[in-house]
Image (spheres, rainbow, N blue to C red):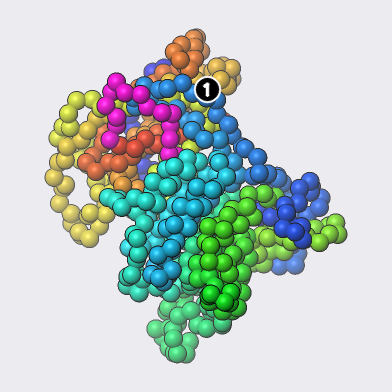
Amino acid sequence: MAAAQNQTAGPQGYVFRLNVRRVPVDIVVTDKQGNPVRGLTKKDFVVKEDNKTQSILSFEYFDGSGLSFVSPKLPPLPANTFVNLPSEPERGPLYILYYDMVNTDPIIQMGTHRQLLQFVDNAQPGTRIALFVNARGLHMVQGFTSDHALLRTAILSKGPGPHLPDVFTDGHTYGWEDPGAALSNLKFIAEYMSGIQGKKNLLWLSGDFPIPVGPTVTGRNGAAAIGGGFSNSTPQINDLTYLMEKIIKETYAALMRSQIAVYPVDLVGIDAGGEALASVANYQYEDTIAAATGGKAFYGNNRANELIDQAVAHGENYYSLSYAPTNTKYDGLSRNIEVTLAKKGDYKLNYRTLYYGVSDDDAQTEHKPDTPQAHFVAAKTTDTLYANIEHGAPMLHDLLFSAHLGTAGAPALATAEQMQQLEDSPAYFLTRKKDTHPKPLKPVKLQKYVIDYGVFDPQLKQLATRNGKPAMLEFAAAAYDADGILLNSILNDGLASTDAKPDGKFGTLFHSEQELEVPPGAAFIRIAVRDRLNDRTGTLEVPLPLKPEGTVASAAKGN
């Protein structure tokens, strides 16, 4: 397979659009014992928006109790050779463990690491989990993986790079009970998950959940989320109220679009006498947060691992439907969703109860226009490749391939043209954003990596020629630092040869070679192969540094 001319993968000229014209609704249905209810059909559900019945356009049931993907047993692989098949079977939806240390008392934190480890050690094999921490900012500690040994290592890690502090005592400095900061973190995670298909369950582990719910800016117990004792007639408070309402709308719209259900997991627990240490009002507010996004709150237990287990079990079986709202006036106001069952029964339904009718023109991101970050977020809404090439995204195996990575020569000083390309990357943009007239960056040494692809997907041979034209494949590679910031990327086109014959250990049908110049500080290289005609995609991610050649590597791990 001949690769076409290299081109950078950074999107240019996109306008961010938040499209709410098809509303996804994921519904967990349980009986009075809390067991999942299976066997319901599209005709069993009645969906209303603001009391008006909606027509259901799509309908599916997802049973997460069984394995969704089991890869064949692979032989030992040569060093630095990877395949996009998981080392563990996969099951259920995606789970995001979001440990909010900023809003958790340091005393409570002392036992949380142990509880997290117990959860990971006892989690159902194949459950795909990513780990985020809110400490000195929001960080991904481990991308999505079904390899729970990697999660255990991430929890125990002391750095360098993102890690869980043993105890974080600077919560008041980094946003303790700050609704704006809490909403921004949820919005960032929702934007990160944008373009990744299917339902995601976000398990928010915290001692406090300081986000407003609904179209007002009130918090728990009806207290003002901002403004203290001032009246709303104060100009400064009016400005703050407007900004808070704006980020509330953006956050809940982003959560809806990315199909994220929030599961508050209260770490406060109970006292020695079995009495709850948090108030009933706090629990009721956590229930409200969960209901607004389609999740369920869990609390009243000192064993956080058991609460997390319950949250995972609750969210793994669900019905997924969508509808096009009959109200086509997108004025930014909240809209209430009501789902009922046509048949009688003692059932409990958990689903998203509200969203915001944000128009395309009013939809914004927190990123400034014309920045690499804004372009990348925008591109994810129109092209799934950008979502799947992100650091830590789930491994995809719709299209199967192998990849051998190796370095070519010693690091060499970048040319002026190469430095110009790097200046447009998010990592280098961050170092220059404060300069009105930035000076050219000093040349850095780039390490060339050569990626040798072997595409052995069984369907591709049958589809090598469609409509009289050879199949067009895309090969993408991106380098990230330890914080997940994009350093450099590349995208190639390749034509699948129609007379290729299987060869090699995997029966490889097509080959392609790609080169990526990697700046200093790279910690991961993520690669993807996509069939452009049907969007079937495979991805995997490789941690750096590479192993010495001559040793044997396991199958692709991580995400």
Q: Position of residue 529 (x, y in %)?
A: 45, 30
Q: Which of 175 and 240 is in front in this view?
A: 175
Q: Quadrant of the N terminus?
A: top left
Looking at the picture, how far across and down is residue 238, in whole percent?
45, 82
**Residue located 70% across and 50% down the image:** 319
Q: Can residue 447 be seen in this view?
A: yes
Q: Which residue lies under the disc numbered 1?
A: 457
Magenta run includes residue 305: no
341 or 328, which is in the foreground? 341
Magenta span of residues: 545-559
Q: Residues within 10 Å of mark 1 (few under 14, many from 20)?
A: many
Tell me the quarter of the picture where residue 339 sits.
Answer: bottom right
Query: Where 232 sits versus 544, above or below?
Result: below
Based on the picture, tell me whether residue 552 belongs to the magenta stretch: yes
Give the quarter of the figure containing the C terminus: top left
| Residue displayed at 57% across by 60% down | 307
Image point 18% across, 56% down: which residue? 437
Q: In this view, does 369 lie to the left or right of 298?
A: left
| Residue 335 in the figure: left or right of residue 47 | left
Where residue 87 appears, as percent x and y from the top left, is: 48, 33
- Is residue 96 visible to the viewer in this orientation of the structure? no
- Report whether 95 appears left or right of 228: right
Q: Which residue is drawn at 39% across and 18% down?
A: 2
The amino acid marked with disc number 1 is Asp
- Seen in the picture, residue 119 relative to 462 is either above or below; the reply is below
Most frequent secondary structure within the magenta stretch: loop
Q: What element carries label 1?
A: loop
Q: Which of 173 and 72 is in front in this view?
A: 72
